Amino acid sequence: MFITYLALFVIVPFVELYILIELGKSIGVLPTLGIVVITGIAGAALAKQQGLGVWHRIQTELSYGHMPGDVLFDGVLVLIGSVLLLTPGILTDITGFILLIPPGRFMVKKYVKAWASKKIQSGQMTYYTHTGFDEY
């Protein structure tokens, strides 16, 4: 698993740099910088809007006495999307925007839930629940 993460953190920046260089060659340096800056500004605005929306949904769920599990998952995805948008690059920006828009989050949640369910059923992943009652 460590090797996978290491490869991810080494390969992704090189791919991003390559794409930015090729884009700069293709459309010019200033338009490329403009794209990076505009996606950063638009991403920050969208992250703030979606983050506040998720925060209000969490508060609403808690005020009704419900555990906001699905909404918390949305919050994690919004956070990851926001961090990806802070990273300059085309692939990370696209991934960040996908995680920030609700239909994109829905698709990612659906995939992650199916993946986790398959892992749990095969015994490769376990989970524990806590009911709040201690056993004596």
Image: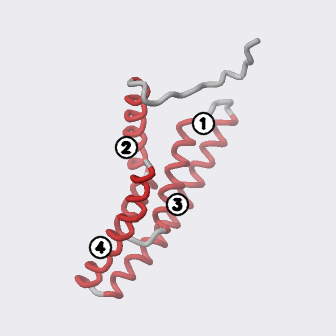
SS for dot 1: loop
Amino acid at dot 1: Pro
Asked whether 109 or 118 is in front, the reply is 118
Mark 1, other Cα within 10 Å: few <14 / some 14–19 / many ≥20: some
Q: Position of residue 107 (x, y in %)?
A: 37, 43
Disc on the earlier residue, 4 or 1: 4
> Which residue is disc 2 drawn over?
107
Q: Are marks 2 and 1 in contact (CB under 8 Å)?
A: no
Q: Are marks 3 and 2 in contact (CB under 8 Å)?
A: no
SS for dot 4: helix
Residue 77 vs 89, above or below: the answer is above
> Which residue is disc 4 drawn over?
19
Amino acid at dot 4: Ile
The colouring scheme, among rainbow, by chain, secondary structure or one colour, is secondary structure
Residue at the location (58% across, 26% down)?
128
> Which residue is disc 1 drawn over?
68
- Farthest front residue in view: 3
Disc on the earlier residue, 1 or 3: 3
Disc on the earlier residue, 2 or 4: 4
